[in-house]
């Protein structure tokens, strides 16, 4: 990991429905890190994620991907910048009428000139790596929530993106499956050197996988800290967020993290 930013927000402001959902937000995501954005429902964290791939355009400020300003890009330039991302959506967003294999193969068929033989090799290798190769011929409705997330991730990374965005990856999953998803995110970073941005309300997950944690509250960036420093923060908003999830300054978290 180096200090060059993969993503940079410069004083980003956004209003939706007459309400400020982002208010002067500035931060950098370093290359190769797992950057976790936490906050309560409606705090602005998912809106922040959407700005990264230009699903939303800021009313004020700019968003950069490397040296390119994605918030001002148009046409082919915007498409090129978006191709640098893979996205795991909250509900996995798999096409229900396609098999697991065809869901993962879809980006290769739409974006490359690979032969079906080459596509098959890539798809099956990725499914194998994520432990869902046996489900290749099944449909999404036949899979558990955790398996759907793994298939969604296989599709998100099949084109070899530089950056993967995770939108509430543990939402709706039981604690054991949630921790498996955490392990999967860590493994993908280690295997491919990916930059990862994770939006979650699950602070336990954030502390387990994040290199740095950013708390957004009512559209404003409150703090960006390492997990250890986040736990020790004296900021009242951070302390309230920790307490709401029964995480204290001292105890199992610091012991397990070796802090």
Image (spheres, rainbow, N blue to C red):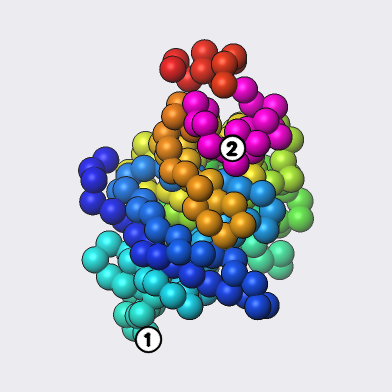
Q: Nearer the viewer, residue 134 or 82?
A: 82
Label 2 secondary element: helix
Magenta stretch containing residue 241, yes or no?
yes
The image quadrant that residue 53 belongs to is bottom left
- Crowdedness of circle 1 by 10 Å Cα count: few (<14), some, many (20+)? few
Residue 123 visible here: no
Residue at image position (57%, 60%) is 219
From the viewer's perspective, is 182 left or right of 83?
Answer: right
**Measured from the top left, where is residue 225 in percent x and y?**
43, 38
Q: Nearer the viewer, residue 221 or 185?
A: 221
The residue tagged 2 is 236
The image quadrant that residue 206 belongs to is top right
Magenta region: which residues? 231-248
* In this rendering, the label closer to the viewer, 2 or 1: 2
Residue 185 vs 64, above or below: the answer is above
**Measured from the top left, where is residue 86 in percent x and y?**
45, 59
Residue at image position (59%, 14%) is 251
Residue at image position (48%, 20%) is 257
The residue tagged 1 is 75
The image quadrant that residue 132 belongs to is top right
Q: How far apart are marks 2 and 1 (CA)?
A: 44 Å
From the viewer's perspective, is 28 left or right of 127?
Answer: left
The residue at the far right in this view is: 141
- Work out which quarter of the rendered image holds the C terminus and state it: top left
Label 1 secondary element: helix
Residue at image position (66%, 49%) is 40
């Amino acid at each position: 990991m180096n200090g060059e930013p993969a993503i940079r927000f410069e004083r980003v402001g956004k209003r939706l429905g007459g309400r400020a959902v982002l208010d002067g937000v500035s931060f950098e995501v370093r290359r190769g890190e797992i950057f976790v954005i936490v906050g309560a429902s409606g705090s602005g964290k998912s809106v922040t994620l959407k700005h990264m791939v230009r699903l939303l355009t800021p009313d004020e400020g700019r968003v950069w991907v490397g040296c390119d300003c994605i918030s001002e890009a148009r046409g082919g330039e915007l498409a090129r910048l978006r191709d640098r991302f893979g996205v795991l959506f909250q509900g996995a967003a798999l096409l229900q009428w396609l098999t697991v294999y065809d869901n993962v193969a879809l980006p290769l068929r739409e974006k490359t000139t690979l032969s079906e033989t080459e596509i098959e090799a890539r798809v099956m290798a990725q499914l194998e790596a994520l432990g869902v190769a046996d489900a290749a011929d099944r449909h999404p409705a036949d899979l558990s929530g955790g398996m759907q997330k793994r298939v969604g991730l296989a599709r998100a990374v099949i084109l070899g993106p530089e950056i993967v965005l995770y939108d509430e990856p543990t939402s709706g999953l039981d604690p054991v499956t949630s921790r498996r998803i955490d392990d999967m995110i860590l493994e993908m970073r280690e295997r491919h050197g990916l930059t990862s941005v994770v939006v979650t309300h699950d602070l336990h997950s954030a502390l387990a996988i994040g290199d740095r944690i950013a708390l957004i509250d009512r559209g404003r960036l409150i703090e960006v800290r390492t997990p250890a420093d986040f736990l020790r923060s004296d900021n009242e908003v951070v302390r309230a967020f920790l307490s709401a999830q029964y995480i204290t300054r001292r105890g199992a978290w610091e012991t397990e993290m070796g802090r």
